[in-house]
Every structure is written in C-alpha cells, then in structure tokens.
Amino acid sequence: MAQETGMPDIQLDSAGLYREDIFTDRKAGTIRRLVPVTVDGNTDPKRTVLYSGQTQLLTPNGVLPLGFEIEASSLEDAIGKFPDAVKEALEQAIEEAREFRREAASRIVVPDVGGGMPGAGSLPGGGKIKL
C-alpha cells in the first residue's frame, strides 16, 4: 500500500508535448519555437508550431522583462514580427501598470463606524471619526 505523502501527483501530458528551440541575437531578445512532437519524439504535423518572444527593457525603475506570443508561420516570419510584438507587449504592460495605479488610488479606507471601544463617542473638536 502506497503511503500518502500529501505531494501533488504531477504528470506530463503525453498528447501535448513540444520540443523547444531557442534563437537569440544576444542583443535584442530571444525567440522560442515550440515544435509539437509525439510521445516518441517525432514531429507531430497535426498540431501548430508556436512562437514566443522575450526581451528586457531598461526603465528608470530597473529592468522590465517582457514575454509575448508571436503569431507566425516560420522563424523568418517571427523575426519580422518581433519588433511589433515587443511594442504591443510594452503597451499592454504600461496599461496594466496604469490600471494597477488607478485601483490602488481608488481604494478608500473607511473607518469602522459600528465597532470600536464601548462608550466612546465622537472625537472632541467636531471630528467625524468614531472610535
């Protein structure tokens, strides 16, 4: 009888295997090509090859890593689409940062009106904060 360890049972999906090829110019970034393969390691022509890109941009706050998908039919196509994909990923990151700031700025801390110490009323001087 196997002893229960509490560890998750992690298994690879044999129908969803990919071989990863990495291409870089060592300057602008990296393109990853994920080639679908069968369980015996041969290329699976029934599934689509996937491309993704990675780069880093230097900002006043430090290095900003960007990762993004590239809709491409070949490595040459992915290289050609890399600059536009970087711009799109950067615009998305900037918009997410703006949204995060808006959400943080709109958080209003409301004092607990009903709780607090028994018998305590309003603060002297006409304050509206209740204890």
Image: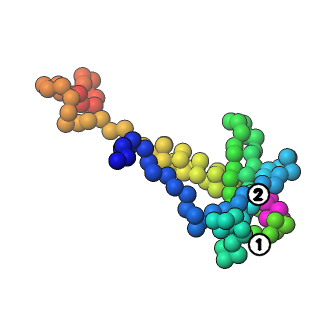
Q: Residue at x 58, y 52 (%)?
A: 96
Residue that label 1 marks: 73
**Amino acid type shown at disc 1:** Ser
Q: Which residues are magenta?
A: 78-83
Q: Residue at x 37, y 38 (%)?
A: 109
Label 2 Cα neighbours within 10 Å, binned few <14 / some 14-19 / many ≥20: few
User: Is residue 60 or residue 36 the one in the foreground?
Assistant: 36
Q: Residue at x 28, y 31 (%)?
A: 129
Query: Dot 1: what SS?
Result: loop
Examine the rendered structure and indicate whether residue 103 appears above or below residue 21. above
**Amino acid type shown at disc 2:** Asp
User: Is residue 16 or residue 42 the one in the foreground?
Assistant: 42
Q: Quadrant of the C terminus?
A: top left
Residue that label 2 marks: 21
Query: Dot 2: what SS?
Result: strand
Q: Quadrant of residue 15?
A: bottom right
